[in-house]
Amino acid sequence: MKLKNIALASLVALSAGCSDFLDLSPKDAANVGNFYRNAADMQAALTAAYGMLAAPGEYGYAYYNVSEVRSDNTMNWEGGGNLPDAELDQFKMSSTNEIIRLMWVDTYRGILACNAVLDHIGNAQMDDALRQRFIGEAKFLRALMYFNMVRTFGDVPLVLSETKSVDEGYGQARMPQAEVYAQIIADLADAAVKLPASYTGADVGRATRGAAQSLLGKVYLTTHDYTKASATLKEVINQGTYKLLDDYAALWPAANANNEESIFEVQFKKGGTGTGSSFYNNFAPRNSGSSVIQVGFASGRNIPTTDLINAYEPADTRKAASLAEGYTDNITGKFVADPYTLKYRDTPFAEADADNNWVVIRYADVLLMYAEAANEVSNGPTAEAYAAINAVRKRAKLAVLPAGLSKSAFALAVEHERQVELAFEGHRWFDLVRTGREVAVMNAHFKAPVVADFNAVFPIPQTQIDVNPAGIRQNPGYTF
């Protein structure tokens, strides 16, 4: 399903304007009281929530910056100066950084779209089974958005209903991470009960039971509840709903979206409707002209680093499917050593208007998370942990891991496997933070003490502090 980012007239959303606060006015003459009446209205409201995932402040742009460019996997073309990309890449971020401002505003817009569904769906005239499914979808989406926010910023406001007044908005202070995670877990647990195992036809792409369980397993892993993480992820494995595709390269063509390995994807659709993705334009080498991408500008973002290129074992078939170390200039005929990712290739309809989805969770991720959790639970790798990671390695045409690894050696093997298996997909930075390895790995990457413990989270956008200084204070370590 290509869920389009429709405009919902009655949505109360956080404003992206100069105040960065609340926009409480309807977007057209429609009255909120005349909306949310039936299944069609609720589906439109839910589609708006799905659509926000594709916004620039969510998976459309900001997410790959905070999850990949922040890490040792990738970098942006703007390597210096005070541009937002360079600040983030080089750990020189200020609280006025536009990427984090976009992420905060757009993600809360998405959260409030979910809250609008959950607040009004009880009174809508509709089939109750469909109502329960819609509730499950809205809770999954809200949990995913809060998960990204709490991992990025730490303590964040926990808003669980529509914001209907400016005074109410000013009262929304940051809440402790533990409370945010508790709500994420509650939402996902309820969603897992309400959602179906799969969909058919136009509904393919909506959140499923497996998506809720997989994300719940990742949340437990992030909060170091390894017993629950292991059990939850094992449930996903035992369901038999998902499988590794035989060919790693088959994961990436836009025509093969929502395949048997995919658990949840953010949907994009090209064609001049405003619902296409910008990834390949953004990731093509900056000075490549039309040598790599034939339509639109090549931006040179999310560029593979030497560290990532060297991380692949010599026989690893994933490298050739994941990245190119350069391109042949179509004017000079010469090879240009300028690496870029191959995972988001497509011919756009127009600039920044392609069909590539963003894969949020796939089965290989589940297997590797399970291996990580099982290793922690048993104080060393079990046979099942070995089986999970080795299934991923065998698909890459690599030898299985040697038996008898210690707990710490196996954990590093999982870390390495996740780096090369999931490269460019938005996992590396949060993996390093989850395991407490971000300072050591990143300072080795920079060959200098650039990263400190406080960098595990990002600065709070200054616009949020300015409008609510009592409830929203800056993260330690960031002074402006």
Image (cartoon, rainbow, N blue to C red):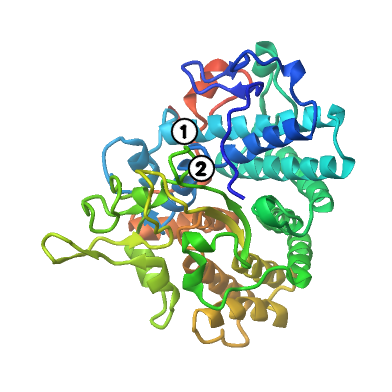
Q: Residues within 10 Å of mark 2 (few under 14, many from 20)?
A: few
Asked if residue 425 can be seen in this view, the reply is yes
SS class, disc 1: loop
Label 2, on which residue? 454
The reply, left or right, for residue 283 in relation to residue 48 is left
Q: Determine which quarter of the picture holds residue 52.
A: top right
Residue 369, above or below 152: below
Q: Tell me the amino acid under the disc marked 1.
A: Tyr
Query: Can you give x and y, in whole percent of width and height, for residue 309 in the image?
Result: 36, 68
Tell me which residue sits at (54%, 80%) in the image: 395
Is 18 positioned to the left or the right of 431 in the image? left
Percent coordinates x, y for residue 354 in the rendering = 43, 49
Identify the residue at image location x=50%, y=36%. 57
Give the image location of residue 315, x and y in percent: 41, 83
Q: Which is nearer the eye, 448 or 227?
A: 227
Pointer 2 with pointer 1, Cβ within 8 A: yes
Please give the label number shown on residue 200.
Answer: none
**Looking at the image, is 307 positioned above or below residue 286?**
below
Lower position in the chain sequence, tag 2 or tag 1: 2
User: How far, Cα to Cα, is label 2 from label 1?
Assistant: 8 Å
For the residue labelled by badge 2, is the local secondary structure a helix, a strand or a loop? helix
User: Which residue does the image show at 68% across and 58% down from the upper left?
Assistant: 221
Left or right for 361, reference 159: left
Residues 458 and 147: in front is 147
Q: What amino acid is at disc 2?
A: Phe
User: Where does the image place residue 266, in percent across and percent down from the top left?
Assistant: 57, 49
Q: Which residue is mark 1?
A: 478
Q: Quadrant of the C terminus?
A: top left
Residue 473's image quarter?
top right
